[in-house]
Amino acid sequence: MCSLFVALPQAEARTRPTPEALKAFDRYAQVTEAELNSAAAANTFLSTFLRIGPERQPRMRHGEILVTERERTDQGRPINPPRGMIQDWEGLMFVPGVTLDGFRSFLQDYDCYKIHYQPAVMESKLKGRDGDQFDVFLRLYQKTLLTVVLDVDYRVQYMAPRPDRIMIVSRSTRIAGV
């Protein structure tokens, strides 16, 4: 899970989110993490949480990266922060011939993200590590109609619900416009 919270409108992007917006974001993260943990514990993560049905498996196995925007609800009601937005995206890909340990090693090489994911990642640095928890800095670049550069700190937790699976929860802890 990778969630990004950006205060709107653009003119106010450098101001602090309201307490109500932060409360909505925290609730969104709580609901999302509970869903992730429940799916991992029930061993239904791939089939139910990411909705990998028979129609999506061939596309993924032929190299397509499946990306889906998610919207979480709290007791049936969408969680929408006042004067803000939450973006929550899931991505899934199949990498043939790669071991889980090799893939985990690649993912945890945060200092090289600026090489592997350029131009979207301009700078990357592992700030600290405690076991399977990583503190990471990324400078992100996106140009569409406007150019946006963000400095983002993340806390990333790696978990192994089964020996043949990894689950990664990445939460931004600081986002600043450059």
Image (spheres, rainbow, N blue to C red):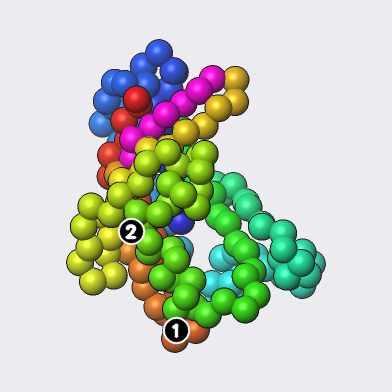
Q: Tell me the quadrant of the picture where the C terminus can be found.
A: top left
Residue type indicated by callout 2: Val
Q: Position of residue 114 (x, y in %)?
A: 43, 46
Q: How many marks?
A: 2
Disc number for residue 156: 2
Q: Which region is colored magenta?
A: 146-152
Q: Position of residue 40 (x, y in %)?
A: 46, 74
In the displayed structure, 108 sits above or below 99; it is: above
Pick whichever of labels 1 and 2 is earlier in the sequence: 2
Callout 2 secondary element: strand
147 magenta-colored: yes
Q: Position of residue 22 (x, y in %)?
A: 30, 36
Q: Residue furthest front?
A: 115
Disc number for residue 113: none
Q: Main secondary structure of the magenta part?
A: strand
Residue type indicated by callout 1: Arg
Q: Residues within 10 Å of mark 2 (few under 14, many from 20)?
A: some
Residue 63, by quadrant, is bottom right
Q: Residues within 10 Å of mark 1 (few under 14, many from 20)?
A: few
Does any portion of residue 43 appear in the rendered image?
no
Q: How far apart are labels 1 and 2 at the CA level? A: 19 Å
Residue bearing the label numbered 1: 162
Callout 1 secondary element: loop
In the displayed structure, 74 sits above or below 45; it is: above
112 magenta-colored: no
* Residue at x 23% of width, y 52% of height: 127
Residue 168, by quadrant, is bottom left
